[in-house]
Amino acid sequence: MRRERAVSGIFLRDDNFFGIACRLVAGLLSAITLASCTAYKTISVKSDPPGVRVSRGGAIVGTTPFEMEVGAGDTFFCTPSYWSFELEAAPQIPGQQSQRRLINPCVISDMATIYFDFPGPQPASTPGQGDISSPPGSERILSARLTELANHFALEIKAHHLSRVAVLPLVDVSRPAMTPLGNYLTERITNEVYKTGSTRVIERSQLDTVIKELSLTMSGKFDETSVKSIGRMLAVDAVIMGTYAEIGAHTLELNTRIVNVETAEVFGASTVQIPKVAVRQLVP
């Protein structure tokens, strides 16, 4: 009986050892799999003006312009909550607020550029010549901001399997109505979302026809009822909608969100700031 118990004890110890060994091997394989699914991308961080200190998680990572490598997972591991992080740039001019950029390596291209814009005082326009105070790079910054916005929505579109999306005209928050500036920004956002390849985007002419039929041309008031009607008439899963507002003398802030047309659930939201002069010189 003692031998059987001893043998049984040996087997019991062997089983424990085998179980621990299996767990160690499984953990090692998981680590190898995760490592094999992880690549690195290089992003270029710039600012206007240069020489701005940029931090991540409270630690300084560089002074613009500089480059940094970030991990990028494949489709399986690539989720906003897992990979996204924020870069924060400290202004050089006293009184200006620091700026933050949400970065997701899963959607940036190799050598993507992240811009921070800290415009200084603008010179007065020469009488009779219009606004000639456009700072260099304003159009470049505008493009970078809108690409950032579109990439953010592309993640939500893929996460919720949205096959058709419409971009509604952005409206002025101070007077809810469609404006030339709102229409221009809408066109730019529509193009950027289309370029992500994340979904089918409804052509603007089709959207304009529906808006006219719903008598929303002048009011620009897109409530839950009108969004449902637009969704039904265009057979879309969601709409991207929002407002723009002037922040100070030199900045426009765009507040946008992507909304389920059936339930009015907000799938995601994004706020970006752009230099006002980049659009004022393009839209009268």
Image (cartoon, helix red, strand yellow):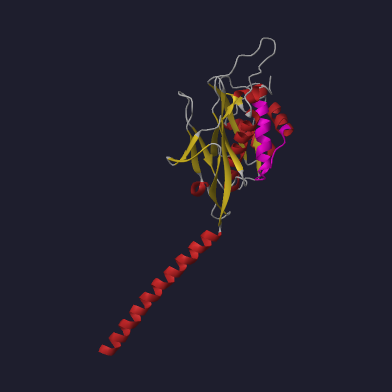
Q: Please provide percent x and percent y for residue 71.
A: 53, 51
140 is higher (above) or lower (below) than 12? above
Question: Would residue 58 appear left or right of 252 to someone viewing this image?
Answer: left
Q: Please provide percent x and percent y for residue 107.
A: 59, 46
Question: Would residue 26 appear left or right of 122 to someone viewing this image?
Answer: left
The image quadrant of residue 132 is top right
Question: Would residue 225 appear left or right of 26 to someone viewing this image?
Answer: right
Q: Please provide percent x and percent y for residue 27.
A: 45, 65
Q: Can residue 265 be seen in this view?
A: no
| Residue at point 34%, 79% (across, down) | 12
Q: In which quarter of the image is the N terminus?
A: bottom left
Q: Please provide percent x and percent y for residue 252.
A: 57, 25
27 is higher (above) or lower (below) than 280? below
Q: Which sits in the foreground, 280 or 119? A: 119
**In the orientation shown, which residue stands out farthest toward the top?**
127
| Residue at point 70%, 28% (across, down) | 213
The image quadrant of residue 246 is top right
Majority secondary structure of the magenta segment?
A: helix
Residues drawn in magenta = 182-204
Residue 163 within the magenta-colored segment of the rendering = no
The image quadrant of residue 163 is top right
